[in-house]
Image (cartoon, grey):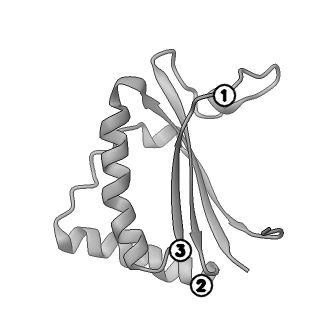
Amino acid sequence: MTYVDGFVVAVLTANKEKYRKHSAEAAVFFKKHGALHLMECWGDDVPKGYMTDFYGAVKAQEDETVVFSWIIWPDKAAREAGNAKVFADMETAGADMTEMPFDGKRMIYGGFEAIVDV
């Protein structure tokens, strides 16, 4: 069954296009190295929670929007091999992915084994 990398970040709302472009450029490398599908979702209807919420998870500021993203891989082994190749290939290709359009210290992410896929 598939394996999913999931991410949540806070992005300056004014940097929406910069973030979109950065993600589209990175997506080429992930697809080249085995990712089946990538999705970047700009927060549109993200409610504030009472106990916790997406904003709190990434310490989003008033001028930031929450972005929810994922990458689907065939399996965990493909993800491990693909990620290693992606970052090496980006460096070789001269892709400047070092300047992220978000604060990476506030990103939450993880790898998830799919248990229901309908």
Given residues 9 and 31, the one toward you in this image is 31
The residue that label 1 is drawn on is 46
Q: Residues within 10 Å of mark 2 (few under 14, many from 20)?
A: few
Asked if marks 3 and 1 touch (Cβ < 8 Å), the reply is no
- Percent x, y of residue 91: 23, 69
Asked if marks 2 and 3 touch (Cβ < 8 Å), the reply is no
Q: Which mark is residue 114?
A: none
Q: CA distance from mark 1 to mark 2?
A: 33 Å
Q: Quadrant of residue 112?
A: bottom right
Disc 1 is placed on an element classified as loop
Q: Which mark is residue 36?
A: 3
- Percent x, y of residue 89: 28, 75
Specify the amino acid type for callout 2: Ala
- Quarter the C terminus occupies: bottom right
Q: In percent of the image, x 73 and y 80: which residue is there?
A: 1
Farthest residue to the top: give it: 62
Disc 3 is placed on an element classified as loop
Q: Earlier in the sequence, mark 1 or mark 2?
A: 1
Q: Earlier in the sequence, mark 2 or mark 3?
A: 3
The residue that label 2 is drawn on is 77
